[in-house]
Amino acid sequence: MSFTGAQPSAVHPGFERAAIVDTAAIRHNVRTIADYVRPAKVMVAVKADGYGHGALTTAQAALEGGADWLGTAHVTEALSLRRAGIEAPILAWLHTRGTNFAEAIEDHIDLGISGWELDEVAAAASRLQTPARVHLKIDTGLGRNGATAAAWPELTQRAYRYQEEGLISVDGIFTHLAVADEPDRRETDEQLEAYRQALAVAEENGIVPDLRHVANTPAALSRPDAHFDMVRVGVGVYGESPFADRSAADLGLKPAMELRTTVANVKRVPAGQGISYGLTHRVDAPTALALIPLGYADGIPRIAVHAPVSINGHVYRSAGRVAMDQFVVDLGSEDAPVSVGDQVVLFGGESGISAADWGEAAHTINYEIITRIGARVPRIVTDSGDATEAE
C-alpha cells in the first residue's frame, strides 16, 4: 500500500500504532558521515531489516544519500535486496552450512570469509565457472567471527591459491571493533595494530585488497586512523548516537524513526492501586492512569521501568511491568488533560524522547530498542524532504 501526503498528526487514519520512518533523515545521516570520512567509501549496514526501519527503504535512502556499499549479515538479506532491484555492491558476512553461496555468487554478492567458508565458496565458484568476490575477516580482538592471528597466514595462503586458480577475487580485508564506542579504551589501538599486522601478513602471501575496512559508526566518527578505504556504519545512519556522552544532535545526526500510538484508555484510581502483573508498582496518591496499546510483543522491553512517553507534548512515565500488548502510564493527577485517542509518542519526532532514553529505562542500548520493534507495528515511510509516503 502506498499513499501521498504530509506526515500524519497522530498515527494515521486506519493505523492503531506505527513506526514512522523518515527517509530524509537517513539521507542526511549518510551524507553527514560521508562528508566526515571522505575520501573513504561508506558501507551502510542494512541488516536486521535495516535496523528495524525496513531494509529496502533504508537501502534506497542510503544510496540516494551517497552510500557506496550496503552490508548485510546474511546472504538471504542480500538476496532480498537484489530481488527488489538493488544493484549496488553488497557484502554479506555471517554464514552457516546452509548458506547458498552459489546463489550469492550468481547475484554478485560479496562474501565475508572467516575460515571454513572459503573452500565451500571456491567449490561453488568452480561449479558455476564464475569467480566469487570475497573479503577476508581477521579477528583482532572481538572474539566473534574472523580468523585468529594463528589461522590467518594459512587462510591468506589458501585464498591466494584460489585466486590464482581464478575461483575467487579477494577484494577486501576487514575486522570489527569491540569498544570504539568508548573512545578512551586502549583496546581499539591494539585492534588497529593487529589489523595492520594482518594486512602485512596478507601482502606477504600475495593478497593486496582494494578495500580495507574496519570502522563502525563510533570509529567512523572518532577515529580517522580507522577509516582506511571504507567505513561500515550502522546505528549512525538511523540517527542514533553510539556514544554514552554525546547525543545524535551533538553528532549532527537526525533520528529516522518515531514510534507512535494513541491512548487506549484513561481511568481514575485510588491511592494504593497496584499496576500490571506482579503488582510491582502501587500509586501513592489518587491519580489517573493511561493505557498505551504497545507491549513486548511489539518490541517494547518488558524490563523497562519508568520509561518516558509523550502524550499531547507532555512527558509522563510508565508504571508497572510492560505486558504483551500494553503498558500503563501514571498521569500524576486525577485531572490530567489526557483522553482516549490522544497521541502518544514513545520516542522520536518532536517528542524530545530518544531511543536511548528507552534503552536506559530497560538497561540496554538504543540499537536494541530500534531493531526490536515488531512486525505488528506497521512502518509508515515518510520523506520530510518531499512529503512522499508509503507503507
Image: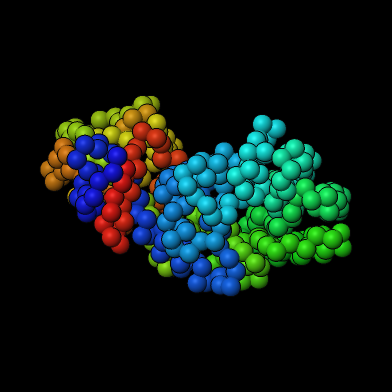
Residue shown at the point (67%, 39%) measured from the top left: 101
Give the quadrant of the N terminus. Answer: top left
Report if residue 123 is visible in the image: yes
Q: Is residue 2 left or right of residue 205?
A: left
Quadrant of the rendered structure where residue 69 is? bottom right
Report if residue 247 is visible in the image: no
Place of residue 295 in the rendered image (x, y in percent of width and height, measured from the top left): 36, 34
Give the vertical position of 212 relative to 133 (above or below).
below
Residue ranking furthest to the front? 129
Quadrant of the rendered structure where residue 42 is? bottom right
Place of residue 220 in the rendered image (x, y in percent of width and height, measured from the top left): 57, 65
Q: How is the image coloured?
A: rainbow
Quadrant of the rendered structure where residue 75 is? top right
Give the quadrant of the C terminus. Answer: top left
Residue shown at the point (28%, 34%) measured from the top left: 293
Q: Nearer the viewer, residue 335 or 26?
A: 26
Instruction: Tell how many labels.
Output: 0
Q: Is residue 22 left or right of residue 200?
A: left
Residue shown at the point (22%, 40%) measured from the top left: 262
Give the vertical position of 105 relative to 244 (above or below).
above
Q: Nearer the viewer, residue 66 or 141?
A: 66
Q: Nearer the viewer, residue 203 or 141?
A: 203
Place of residue 201 in the rendered image (x, y in percent of width and height, measured from the top left): 84, 61
Q: Is residue 173 left or right of residue 300?
A: right
Residue shown at the point (67%, 47%) measured from the top left: 111
Residue ranking furthest to the top? 278
